[in-house]
Image (cartoon, rainbow, N blue to C red):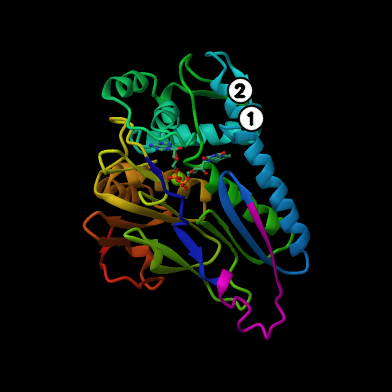
Amino acid sequence: MKRFFAVFSVIILVLTGCADKGTGGSAQAKSRSVFAMDTYMELKAYGDNADAALDRAVSRINEIEAELSVTLPDSDISRLNTSGGEPVEVSRDCAWLISNAVKYGGMTGGALDITLYPVVKEWGFTTGEYKIPDDARLTELLSNVDYSAVSVNDKEVTLPENAEVDLGALAKGFTSSQVAAILKEDDVRSGIVSLGGNVQAIGSKPDGSDWRVSVRDPFAPETDMCIVEISDMAVITSGNYERYFTGEDGKNYWHIIDPADGYPADNGLVSVTVIGADGLMCDALSTALFVAGKDSAADLWREEGGFELILVTDDAEIFYTEGLEGKFTNVSSMTTEVISR
Ligand code: FAD
Ligand code: MG
């Protein structure tokens, strides 16, 4: 089987463009590139404190990875996954993320389920040993999948005896929000970070205009599909073209799994972008709504609010929510339709 490398679903135009336009050249960007969480991360900040702030942000990224990685044996997540049903005291970050994961699991009718980890592992995602599991094995593994059986009491987390969790669906969004908070605490008024395509803007561009963030075309991931203009927001995409392998049957199998059957989610969407102030929420929902499909995604947007959506269907149509009107530019040949309240 063939492995395809992850491609970033979103790129930041300013990383290659001119963020300094309109500032008379006075605003000097400071930047850092980091490889963490199996992902390339780019951080960019403006202002007198930018260097120190970026150093603190990078330390925070490394701290979160050490706490949450499923592949590091001493992480909170590894201790939980080998706890045999006993309560485990974890970091504040880990407890916060797990309680949010349970909340978003409930909000999305179980489309987000962090206890899917044994199923994700069986397909070979995170280990790189890709295979198509047989149905009996999936049924056996799914019998231990239930996010609602995870309990969090302050910093103490308890998993059912055979359960294992993975926060890969929402941890990068949380991390980007943490990075934004650190940069702001250190007086950075303008900056932008991309954690493997998960983008978070700090304020607006130095000239006061919105950041212009491009979202990739899921049918041609090397090209842009649309541009969204944002300030102080996260733009987070889940797609079927990011991490996948081609099976011996010639079909592609991707890393977002439907908890209903343990197979890669195939409910009519090829890409879901969530735009909002809370990176954790955007990341959790990008994965969950990819699983849920277009109509459920639109319903959740109408019920909950606090975020906007760009959905791409497998028949190559773009649907975006009305809050993006005036901030959204289609640069692809796909047709667009607005989702209204
Ligand atoms: P998202 O859509 O945000 O998340 C998809 C991921 O969530 C899947 O890869 C799977 O892990 C999980 N998932 C799938 N379906 C569901 C579902 N229905 N509900 C809940 N979760 C689901 N990867 C490596 O290969 N090696 C590493 O060493 C490694 N270290 C990491 C350390 C940390 C702290 C984190 C957060 C991630 C790490 N990753 C690692 C994972 C890698 O970065 C993932 O590909 C990434 O988290 C998935 O993010 P995404 O934005 O591509 O997709
Ligand atoms: Mg996600």
Q: How far across and how far down the image is residue 73, in percent?
A: 63, 27
**Quick check: is the Cβ at mark 1 less than 8 Å away from ligand 1?**
yes
Q: Is residue 286 above or below residue 336?
A: above
Q: Which residue is mark 2?
A: 79
Q: Quadrant of ligand 2?
A: top left
Q: Is residue 262 above or below residue 300?
A: above
Q: How far across and how far down the image is residue 158, in percent?
A: 54, 19
Q: Is residue 298 visible?
A: no
The segment highlighted magenta reads 15-34
Q: Is residue 224 above or below residue 274?
A: below
- Amino acid carrying label 1: it is Ser
Q: Which residue is mark 1?
A: 75
**Secondary structure that dominates the magenta span:** loop
User: Mark 1 touching mark 2, by CB under 8 A?
Assistant: yes
Q: How far across and how far down the image is residue 278, in percent?
A: 52, 51
Residue at image position (58%, 53%) is 40
Residue at image position (72%, 81%) is 26
Q: Is residue 190 visible?
A: yes
In space, the residues marked 1 and 2 are separated at their CA atoms by: 6 Å
Q: How many callouts does the rendering have? A: 2
Q: Which one is nearer the viewer's eye here, 200 or 245?
A: 245
Q: Which one is nearer the viewer's eye here, 293 or 35?
A: 35
Q: Residue furthest bottom?
A: 24
> Quadrant location of residue 228?
bottom left
- Amino acid carrying label 2: it is Arg
Residue at image position (24%, 54%) is 314
Q: Secondary structure at mark 2?
A: helix
Please tell me whether residue 292 belongs to the stretch shown in magenta: no
Other-residue count near label 1 (Cα within 10 Å), few / some / many at <14 / 14–19 / ≥20: many
